[in-house]
Amino acid sequence: MGVKNNWKLEEVKALYDLPVLDLVFKAAGVHRENHDSKQVQISALVSIKTGGCAEDCSYCPQAARYNTDVNTHKLMQVDEVIDRAKKAKEAGSSRLCMGAAWREVRDNRDFDRVLEMVREVNAMDMEVCCTLGMLSDDQAQRLADAGLYAYNHNIDTSEEHYKEVISTRTFDDRLNTHKSVRKAGVSLCSGGIIGLGETKDDRLKMILTLANSEKQPESVPINTLVPVEGTPLENQEKVPVWDLVKMVAIARITMPKSAVRLSAGRLELSDEGQAFCFMAGANSIFAGDTLLTTPNPAFDSDMILFKTLGLESKKAFADGAQPKSKEISGIEAEKSEMVAKVKEWKKEMAKN
Ligand code: SAM
Ligand code: DTB
Ligand code: SF4
């Protein structure tokens, strides 16, 4: 039987309103029916291009318009990224997620460099994920050809609340990128953030958008807002841990086959809080001392918690075959560089 993807708001509301322990019990059952509950997938994040972003996402320390304390830098060199990937792999991460503070990908040399990073990290037998902003069909295909395993592109909140959080792009823009990722046959990672001032219905509608999509995302990150000084949401009220546990449980029940990732905000959680999230069906984390720009629990403390709880780190490609990176010939590389240049010139000319 296929996975149910016609969830109604009333059905998920009924889940949300269950006593927490009943909801967790139910989710734990679904988790055990669909996954080995000991196995947790570990991803490491590298911010390959930090800060200076043109967007106005009100939670994000990397938006150029907010006065935050991030160390901005241009796109990293391929060697530096490979170095970080090696360290992450040695520490036990099976996936490397490369994040760039871009509104969208542009067909230029920076993108060519990202494609090279994807090729080289895939050759290290790690799952490669990117989160680079909006993509066209062609860009998604080029990433796939380079050996990309997954693409992260969060919907963040409900369609209704989206406008309150971001004004420089629409909810539909996000869904269009999902389509491009799907067309290219790349695994989709998409989730959201709680603590943005949304209502209970907004949280549940966000889940419905993901769970009722034609093909549910293979990976669903549930972030809790990390309030960063200088952003419009710096003084946002803290989310009670039980709200997070409920969101994890509902994501698990409605998206039984997906990986549910306990994402930003783990530093605020006690070991017991995290254990509840694993019980409720979380089976993936971001590990490493920093997320993109904000702190995360130290890798060693995560490993101690894993040992205490009897959790193990999942091997790379346990859920899907390793993509084959297509070699590009010298002529193709030159061609793509020329096409990129022409596109950039056209954009510049249109501006003037
Ligand atoms: N620029 C690309 C984009 O927006 O898709 C990729 C990087 S962006 C930083 C990736 C995701 O990080 C966002 O979609 C958001 O869900 C999450 N994020 C950013 N700042 C956050 C914060 N302060 N707290 C929690 N999650 C955050
Ligand atoms: C996701 O859902 N969470 C990660 C990853 N995908 C890219 C990012 C969290 C960022 C938290 C704020 C920061 O460190 O800048
Ligand atoms: Fe830019 Fe992404 Fe941050 Fe939005 S979330 S400001 S698009 S880096």
Image (cartoon, helix red, strand yellow):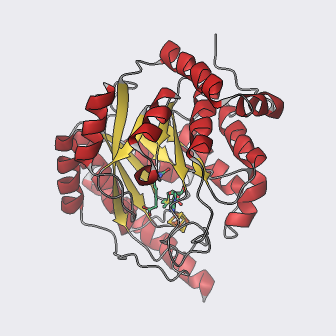
Where residue 172 appears, x then y in whole percent? 71, 53
**Residue pictured at 78% horizontal, 45% vertical:** 201
Where residue 117 appears, x then y in whole percent? 28, 54
Where residue 267 appears, x then y in whole percent? 40, 53
Judge from the rendering whether residue 67 lies leftward or rightward of residue 111; answer left or right: right
Where residue 81 appears, x then y in whole percent? 24, 58
Return the residue nearer the eye: 181 or 248.
248
Most extreme residue toward the bottom is 352
Q: Is residue 331 above or below residue 317?
A: below
Q: Quadrant of the N terminus?
A: top right
Q: Is residue 184 above or below residue 75?
A: above
Return the residue nearer the eye: 11 or 81.
11
Most extreme residue toward the right is 10
The reply to whether residue 149 is in sight is no
Judge from the rendering whether residue 255 lies leftward or rightward of residue 70; answer left or right: right
Judge from the rendering whether residue 132 lies leftward or rightward of residue 157; answer left or right: left
Count of numbered labels shown in the rendering: 0
Q: Quadrant of residue 278?
A: top left
Q: Quadrant of the C terminus?
A: bottom right
**Residue pictured at 43% horizontal, 37% vertical:** 272
Q: Is residue 302 above or below residue 27?
A: below
Q: Is residue 338 above or below residue 12?
A: below
The reply to whether residue 230 is in sight is yes
**Residue pictured at 78% horizontal, 29% vertical:** 14
